[in-house]
Image: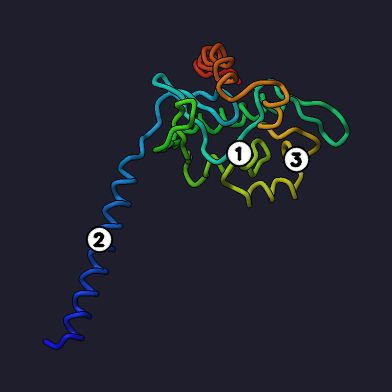
Amino acid sequence: MTGFRRSLRDGVVGVAMLLLALLIIAKLDRDGERDFSGDLVAIDGDTLANGKGRARLEGIDAPELSQTCRHHDGEAWRCGVEARRRLAALLAAPSLHCKGGAFDRYDRLLVHCRTGEVDVNAFMVREGFAVSYGGYPAEEAAARRDGVGIWSGEFDRPEVWRRANSLDAGEMAAADTGDLLFAFLRRLFGIN
């Protein structure tokens, strides 16, 4: 075997081994994902809970429960409450499936949820009940263009609203703990 052929063979074997290693790493990374399922309740427009813990929809940021927005005509509306209501309706779907692998600084599992063909995270942004927060910029642009949800008037981005009201997401999560019981009871008795 000539030196060129040996080098070519060694190069092909090396590339094949590298590709195999990358496939194994990708598989192990997917195996690190966790299912977040059970009887899920919406704490707010981007946080959900079951009996075992809390999760946050990755890549989005929804208005806080006590946050209000204004329509173009100046009328105030409770956009945080409406965002939670929309998420709760999606969580009620029998085909809902949430998965995630990373945790945020408040120890909430960051998840992507689907119900059938609907990407729940993208839906919340596209319908104007959340803003893009590291994901879904095309959905936010479409919601803004169409003037839906929070884009139907004036609002503070949730992160700005929390800062202006001297609250961070951890304090908001702690303040929402009492709402978890009420959300569970509403779901149990079918009250929206």
- The residue lying at 55 percent from left, 16 percent from top is 174
Q: Looking at the image, is mark 1 or mark 2 earlier in the sequence?
A: 2
Q: Position of residue 112 (x, y in %)?
A: 47, 40
User: Which image quarter holds the C terminus?
Assistant: top right
Distance of label 1 from label 2 (alpha carbons): 38 Å
- The residue lying at 67 percent from left, 31 percent from top is 158
Which of the labelled discs sits on residue 20, or is there none? 2
- The residue lying at 20 percent from left, 80 percent from top is 7
Q: Looking at the image, is mark 3 or mark 2 earlier in the sequence?
A: 2
Q: Are marks 1 and 2 in contact (CB under 8 Å)?
A: no
Q: Is residue 190 left or right of residue 36?
A: right
| Amino acid type, residue under disc 2 in the picture | Leu
User: Circle 1 sits on which residue?
Assistant: 124
Q: Is residue 51 left or right of residue 127?
A: left
| Amino acid type, residue under disc 1 in the picture | Met
- Which secondary structure, mark 2? helix
